[in-house]
Amino acid sequence: MGLPSFRFKQFEVWHDRCAQKVGTDGVLLGAWTQVDGCENILDIGTGSGLIALMMAQRAPKAKVVGVEIDAEAAQQAQENVSKSPFHNRIQIVQSDVRDFSSPVAFDCIVCNPPFFVEETLPDNSQRAMARHTALLDFSDLIKVSSRLMDPSGTFNVILPATSSNYFVDQCFMNGLYLVRQCRICTVKSKPPKRVMLSFSRMGKGDNSYETLVLQERDGSRSEAYRKLTEDFYL
């Protein structure tokens, strides 16, 4: 059984009451997403509050909202935020994001979305909400993000590499255009398992294509992985 909390350089995340635990995917997305100049950031499906906390650390002038449908996870996220140095800039909202509205548009939206689409859901209903598309499918997520995003903002996700082409197509049909991507390989010799994608309504950006290898041959963190996450991992 894993540890009930995970300590980062500037904050601690308790996740024992959350279905979606602190993991590499969330840390990568929180470290990779561009936040320069951001004033309002939205984390959809915040879970334990991990990415919301990372956004607040990286964007010291931004206000961050984390939306979470599961009441117990939202409560734990609020507890994590309240103990952090960024508690006055992060708001946790317990809500279905499809029902969520905001007086301001967000110039950065991040999401580590549910992506397992097997027909058989796990018995644990909380885990089902966190890890499956049954309640919030890709189409809903994209439409919600498009509705809540500032015209010049970005929408950023991490997905299985096998889902990326479909997701890009769905975003295109909703007026969101791929401007940046990073394929993630565990080791150099293996194909990518994850991909991080950034979309803009304006369709502008460097359209950069990156590959991030996480491990060296001896199993240690690669220099690129270490550098990307150096402000967070102890």
Image (cartoon, rainbow, N blue to C red):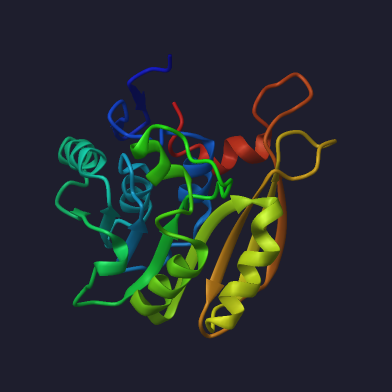
The residue at 18%/40% (across/down) is: 75
Residue 204: image location, x then y, percent: 59, 82
User: Which residue is depicted at the point 57% across and 50% down?
Assistant: 117
Q: Nearer the viewer, residue 114 or 185?
A: 114
Q: Is residue 30 visible?
A: yes
Residue at 71%, 56% in the rendered image: 210
Which residue is situated farthest in the front direction here? 120
Q: Height in image: 140 above or below 120?
A: below
Q: Report the front residue among 156 and 11.
A: 156
Measured as percent of width and height from the top left, residue 189 is found at 85, 36
Q: Is residue 100 above or below residue 158?
A: below
| Image height of 141 relative to 159, above or below | below
Count of numbered badges drawn on the protein: 0
Q: Quadrant of residue 177?
A: bottom right
Vertical relation: 150 (above or below) 212? below
Q: Quadrant of residue 64?
A: bottom left
Name the one closer to the observer, 86 or 69. 69
Which quadrant is the N terminus positioned in?
A: top left
Residue 204 seen in the figure: no
Residue furthest to the right: 189
Q: Is residue 199 left or right of residue 191?
A: left
Q: Position of residue 58 (x, y in %)?
A: 38, 52
- Residue 101 in percent (x, y) is at 23, 72
Placement of the C terminus among the 4 image quadrants: top left
Left or right of 180, for residue 110: left
